[in-house]
Image (spheres, grey):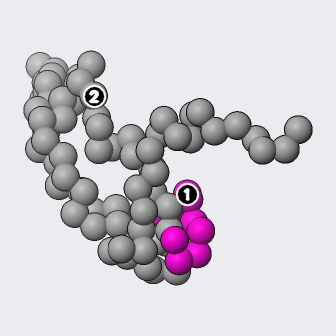
Amino acid sequence: MAEEAGAARQFRCSACGNLTRFDVTVSRRVKEFRHFSVGGDLTVESVEVLEEHVDAVECRWCKASGDAIELRSPAVAENAEPAEG
Ligand SMILES: [Zn+2]
């Protein structure tokens, strides 16, 4: 499996604190394994992402974009432990 480095990154809106809902415009170049049946029905068996670029991210809550949207590292989120307790 190819790593999707860009796809896994989580965003954070510094304007309103939103972590979960964003409109993300992505340019993606993919290679698909297209499996056609004899009858012509198409099944995409696999998709390999060759190239991916996040063009724009907009907060769904407050519509902030650009510098207001921060990238979060997945590693930070996984290693984070509750401060309380
Ligand atoms: Zn926001």
- Looking at the rendering, in which quadrant would you find the N terminus? top left
Compute the Cα span from label 1 to label 2. Answer: 22 Å
Find residue 3 and name its label: 2
What residue is drawn where x is 42% and y is 74%? 68
What element does badge 1 sit on? loop
Give the amino acid type for the residue marked by disc 2 in the picture: Glu
Q: Is residue 18 magenta?
A: yes
Give the amino acid type for the residue marked by disc 1 in the picture: Thr
Residue 51 location in percent, x, y?
13, 41
Magenta stretch, main secondary structure, is loop
Q: Quadrant of residue 71?
A: bottom left
The answer, for residue 65, to whether it is visible in the render is yes
Q: Residues within 10 Å of mark 2 (few under 14, many from 20)?
A: few
Image position of 80 (left or right of 55): right
What residue is drawn where x is 39% and y is 46%? 9
What are the residue bounds of the magenta stretch? Answer: 14-23
Q: Where 15 falls versus 44 (above or below)?
A: below
Image position of 13 (left or right of 39): right
Q: Residues within 10 Å of mark 1 (few under 14, many from 20)?
A: few
Q: Is residue 75 magenta?
A: no
Residue 2 location in percent, x, y?
23, 24
Task: Confirm or reject: label 1 Cβ below 8 Å from ligand 1.
Answer: no
Q: What residue sits right under mark 1 in the picture?
A: 20
